[in-house]
Image: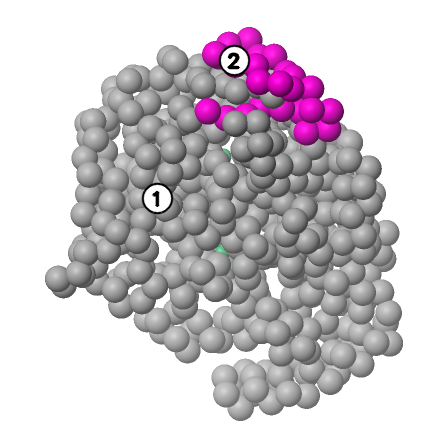
Amino acid sequence: MGGWAPYLLTNRKTHTSITFGSGTLIVSGQSLFCACRLLLTPDNLQEGSPVPNLVVVGCQWGDEGKGKIVDILAHHADVIVRFQGGSNAGHTVVTRKGTFVFHLIPSGILSRGKQCVLGNGVVIDPGALIEEMDRLRGQGVRIGRNLAISQRAHLIMPYHKAIEEASERARGMKRIGTTGKGIGPAYVDKMARIGIRIEDLLAPSIFRQKVEENLVEINLFLEQVYHMKGFRAEKVCREYLNYAPRIHAHVVDDSLLLHTAMQQGQAILFEGAQGTHLDVDLGTYPYVTSSNACAGGACTGTGVGPTKIDAVLGVTKAYTTRVGSGPFPSELTDAIGERLQERGNEFGSTTGRPRRCGWLDALVLRYAVRVNGCSSLAVTKLDVLDGMKELKIAVAYQHGDTIYTDMPAAHHVLTECEPIYEVLPGWKASTSKVTSYKALPREAKQYLTRIEELTECPVDLISTGSRREQILILRNPLAHTRSRLRVAQVSA
Ligand code: GDP
Ligand code: IMO
Ligand code: MG
């Protein structure tokens, strides 16, 4: 499709025309076709914005810069909702007021007057949540009723962290390299139907009964299999029931809240955590997290039906990183990898671990665009590639006599394959101060166009630095909603 394909830009609410400062516009009835790249800024992104519901997901193995992108888009949404994962996430946003790191709370909380929600698909460590609320408040962020927590969200219990730690130790060389936050065991209990939910925390006798019942089996497991000390129900209950008053006022039915917001014409932004290739179903299994980090998870993780989702924005770095174990075909273990790590400051915001770095991988991205149904992409950290003589993009994998042009599922293929690279010229100039797409070095534009061609998905946003203003907005990612596309077909 490429970035030059015609796009329909209409106002969904009123279906009236909108005008932009630049671009070739062909008026067709009440619709406007734009056959050229439009340059928007974070301020005029609002212009002509409809009120669609947009899912933002990571296209790689997490840390793509989702937090920064959600922070920018949150200004133009009404509700921002996390739908999966827990405090394994680390989303960093840099503003004039400082650096904010989010583990559970949507980064949209920085935008005044927005409703933030922790959806039912999230697993919540209440201690970690309270710590995050207090830390953010200390940084001047207002957190009151603007933070809602689903009554159906599951709790991470102290024994989840103990089980994870023991299991990782027992795996030895085969360990997943988890964040140690108890995520996997919490989702295991949810699926085993012995999970404890936020609503239980508000009903002390039910909570006590569930903890006591669970600990019978869990203590046996910890003591007999891992030779660890079990947990005392009384101690666990005392700690957790102390958290309840801090959380009580935030607890809601998330599905109902979002439904009501949609009825009022409000725009919902779904903030993904982790990334496509860490998704428990669609990622590089078993080296994945335990939730659905793909766009589909936005529905089950919030109680919003698929027909309500209008667009999916996939976020990708201009290169690739991965933290923890697992296959990474385009990984660089040489000086170039070190350079990416150093220039990109590639150290995890949750665990501080160094992130493994490598070239951009078109198979990874094409797969992400497909399984998420991405309507457009945001490319981040373009500036990290400044000054590199040449750049490589993996366009196929070779495994024995087999050439793969689409992401293989088998773990051993992903581990053993050799990537086949396409080489592109690098650029010398710095992109971090560039304020228009036009002003980007020619080779940077060529690189971005190649990403669009290889993924068959348009690039809407380009990030050239960690700060809010270091963003080039080529097109409003809310512009290609399905309803718009349908109108386009009818008009054509
Ligand atoms: P997330 O988990 O997807 O939200 O990503 P993280 O916040 O864990 O990691 C992205 C890191 O890159 C953060 O430290 C951001 O401040 C930073 N960052 C985001 N966009 C850019 C960019 O375009 N250039 C540079 N140099 N840093 C960026
Ligand atoms: P954000 O939202 C990068 C990785 C861990 C490990 C695997 C499983 O900041 O992009 P888990 O603790 O989830 O059971 O660990 O998943 N992982 C992430 N990697 N970014 C994240 O989140 C991650 N969350 C989990 O390193 O390999
Ligand atoms: Mg992160």
Q: Quadrant of the N terminus?
A: top left
Closer to the camera, 302 or 209? 302
Q: Is residue 107 visible?
A: no
Q: Please, is residue 394 above or below residue 230 in the view?
A: above
Image spot of residue 445 (x, y percent): 33, 22
Residue 81 within the segment the image draws in magenta = no
Please provide the residue range marked out in magenta: 6-30
Q: Give whichever of 69, 259 is nearer the camera.
A: 259
Q: Give the quarter of the image for residue 299.
A: bottom right
Q: How many numbered discs sit on the rendered protein?
A: 2
- Which of the marked residues, 2 or 1, is nearer the chain's N terminus? 2
Instruction: Find the residue positioned furthest to the left.
Output: 401
> In the drawing, does residue 446 fall left or right of residue 224?
left
Figure check: 426 above or below 155: above
Residue under circle 2? 25
Would residue 197 be seen by someone viewing this image from the given angle?
yes
Q: Main secondary structure of the magenta part?
A: loop
Q: Residue 189 got which mark?
A: none
Q: Percent position (x, y) of residue 110?
A: 68, 33
Tell me residue 40's x, y (percent): 54, 18
Query: For this view, does 345 lie left or right of residue 388?
Result: right
Judged by depth in the image, the label closer to the viewer, 2 or 1, is 2
Question: How is the protein colored in the picture?
Answer: one colour
Residue 320's label in the rendered image is 1
Q: Position of residue 421 (x, y in %)?
A: 19, 43
- Under 8 Å from ligand 1: the CB of mark 2? no
Residues at marks 2 and 1, CA–CA distance in whole angstroms: 36 Å
Disc 2 residue type (three-letter): Leu
Q: Residue at x 25, y 45 (%)?
A: 394
Above or below residue 394? Residue 214 is below
